[in-house]
Image (spheres, rainbow, N blue to C red):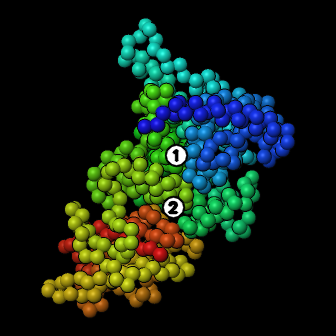
């Protein structure tokens, strides 16, 4: 358990240091290196703007700049310390304002398009004001112990609320940075230094999303929606008190792709805040609904359909660098969800449908091959049939645009016959088992669903739920026995 308030002893020491720094930097070097360092050890470049730097703020907010108090600085520092490196790179400036965002007056923090590296924080009463963050946790004499506890638990909620709000906004900055780094030119518009753009560029290259992270996020969600595994975005969704729609981290996450990214990225990493005590009191967050506890409760194996979209989005955020592995496993918890695959296990592994008992593995001569518009994955193994053993090839193929990887959900609805390999490429998604020495036992799926839950230049992994197959006896017949099966695949470089 962390007690954020107990850090305030240290805070008063470095606040004193800031005051001195603020004076010197404001007079000596204004524009670029001015401002107060935000005091975050893990994100040290972030500056808190002073009234001298009003030109760095949107016109309407220039007269409203205020100097933050010690609690506001501590909340900011706590949010910045949670950021994974890429998100930290995206945030360069913060400003506290005695103003609200006119279109969302209740917002604690926001990021505007024109200054995508700047987090605006509202310091008016009811948002992230110093007064609201200054807790008087003494008991009221006319109240019994339980009511005093409840009152204080409601009061300290402001801390995780403010820290999470700032943290959430940082992912809007990160999304803008990734968008600025996309495309082929390798140059980016925007306020970020070349090192930050280079880091974003590396993230896009690693996930083969140089066409754009947001574009891929939208495509991913559309596929899940069209497969019935996720609800559609709806901009009327606000707040987090309603249950998250299927496929989303929170109710608000279902608002739009931008909020979905910020919500999916921010909640898992912020979970330690919810367990922390503030001035010795744990906050009452019972009306905050987010998906992680549900994921952790799941007791089956594999990645079930109802969580496939969210699981894949969490993994995508890990792969792009907006979430740590640790935050993702915090969210999934100690449940049993995940692929039945250990690192280094490549190729294909079949599992029994109900029991997830391992069946045949295909791990020999494992290959992944790219053509201009397809990715073809294969592995050899030995299948036993009527007392004989046969060398058997498993093939899985995805249609992908040049410069991109398969990711998310794919429905297999037809089997393109046992065409020679050259003709395989006509089929968008295909799964088949070929037995060259006993072709009548070869099969091809015509009713299956494939999930690519992770895709980077180093690792491609996922599973195929194969419901129905054709068996290529003469004439071909729909095979019944032995299906459905789960097939887990993994390819590593
Ligand atoms: Zn937002």
Among all residues in the image, which is located at the extreme left?
Answer: 387
Number of residue marks? 2
Find the residue positioned furthest to the top: 142
Label for residue 391? none
Q: Residue at x 52, y 71 (%)?
A: 457
Q: Is mark 2 within 8 Å of ligand 1?
A: no
Please indicate, yes or no, whether residue 285 appears anywhere in the rendered image. yes
Q: Disc 1 marks which residue?
A: 266
Which sits earlier in the primary sequence, circle 2 or circle 1?
1
Q: Which quadrant of the figure contains the N terminus?
A: top left
Q: Residue at x 31, y 79 (%)?
A: 362
Residue 311 drawn at (x, y percent): 42, 55
| Residue 327 in picture, x, y percent from top left | 46, 50
For the residue pair 89 and 117, the one nearer the viewer reads as 89
Q: Picture coordinates of residue 476 (x, y %)?
A: 26, 83
* Image height of 153 relative to 400, above or below: above
Name the residue carrying label 2.
Answer: 319
**x 44%, y 8%: residue:** 141
**Going by the image, does 350 lie left or right of 129?**
left
179 and 35: which is toward the camera: 35
Q: Count residues near mark 2 (Cα–Cα under 10 Å), then give few for <14, some for 14-19, many for 20+.
A: many
User: Residue 126 sits in which quadrant?
Assistant: top right
Please tell me whether mark 2 sits on a helix, a strand or a loop. Answer: helix
Instruction: Classify mark 1: helix, strand or loop.
Output: helix
Q: Nearer the viewer, residue 444 or 152?
A: 152
Q: Quadrant of residue 76?
A: top right
Residue 476 vertical position relative to residue 164 in the rendered view, above or below: below
> Callout 1 environment at 10 Å: few (<14), some (14 to 19), or many (20+)?
many
């Amino acid at each position: 358990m962390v007690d954020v308030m107990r850090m305030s002893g240290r805070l008063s020491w470095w606040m004193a240091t800031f005051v001195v720094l603020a004076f010197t930097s404001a007079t000596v070097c204004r524009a670029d290196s001015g401002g107060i360092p935000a005091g975050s050890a893990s994100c040290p470049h972030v500056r808190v703007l002073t009234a001298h730097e009003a030109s760095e703020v949107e016109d309407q907010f220039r007269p409203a700049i205020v100097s933050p108090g010690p609690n506001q600085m501590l909340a900011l520092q706590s949010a910045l310390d949670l950021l994974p490196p890429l998100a930290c790179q995206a945030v360069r400036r913060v400003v506290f304002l005695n103003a609200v965002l006119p279109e969302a007056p209740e917002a604690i923090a926001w990021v505007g398009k024109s200054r995508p590296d700047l987090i605006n924080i509202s310091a008016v009463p009811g948002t992230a004001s110093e007064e609201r963050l200054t807790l008087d946790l003494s008991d009221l004499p006319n109240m019994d112990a339980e009511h005093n506890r409840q009152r204080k638990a409601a009061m300290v909620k402001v801390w995780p609320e403010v820290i999470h709000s700032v943290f959430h906004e940082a992912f809007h900055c990160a999304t803008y940075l990734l968008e600025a780094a996309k495309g082929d030119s390798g140059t980016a518009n925007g306020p970020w230094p070349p090192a930050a753009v280079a880091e974003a560029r590396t993230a896009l290259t690693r996930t083969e999303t140089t066409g754009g992270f947001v574009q891929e996020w939208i495509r991913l969600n559309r596929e899940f929606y069209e497969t019935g595994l996720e609800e559609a975005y709806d901009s009327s969704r606000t707040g987090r008190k309603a249950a998250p729609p299927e496929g989303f981290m929170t109710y608000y996450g279902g608002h739009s792709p931008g909020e979905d990214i910020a919500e999916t990225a921010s909640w898992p990493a912020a979970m330690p805040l919810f367990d922390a005590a503030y001035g010795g009191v744990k906050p009452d967050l019972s009306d905050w609904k987010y998906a992680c506890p549900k994921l952790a409760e799941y007791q089956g194996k594999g990645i079930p359909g109802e969580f496939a979209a969210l699981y894949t989005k969490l993994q995508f955020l890990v792969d792009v660098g907006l979430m740590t592995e640790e935050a993702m496993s915090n969210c999934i918890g100690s449940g049993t969800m995940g692929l039945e695959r250990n690192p280094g296990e490549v190729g294909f592994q079949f599992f029994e449908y109900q029991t997830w008992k391992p069946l045949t593995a295909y791990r020999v001569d494992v290959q992944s091959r790219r053509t201009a518009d397809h990715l073809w994955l294969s592995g050899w193994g030995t299948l036993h049939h009527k007392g004989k053993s046969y060398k058997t090839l498993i093939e899985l193929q995805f249609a992908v645009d040049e410069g991109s990887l398969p990711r998310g959900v794919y429905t297999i609805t037809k089997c393109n016959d046992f065409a020679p390999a050259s003709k395989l490429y006509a089929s968008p998604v295909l799964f088949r088992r070929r037995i060259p020495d006993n072709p009548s036992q070869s099969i091809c799926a015509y009713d299956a669903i494939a999930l690519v839950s992770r895709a980077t230049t180093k690792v491609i992994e996922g599973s195929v739920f194969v419901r129905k197959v054709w068996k290529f006896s003469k004439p071909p017949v729909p095979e019944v026995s032995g299906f459905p099966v789960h097939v887990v695949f993994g390819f590593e470089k």
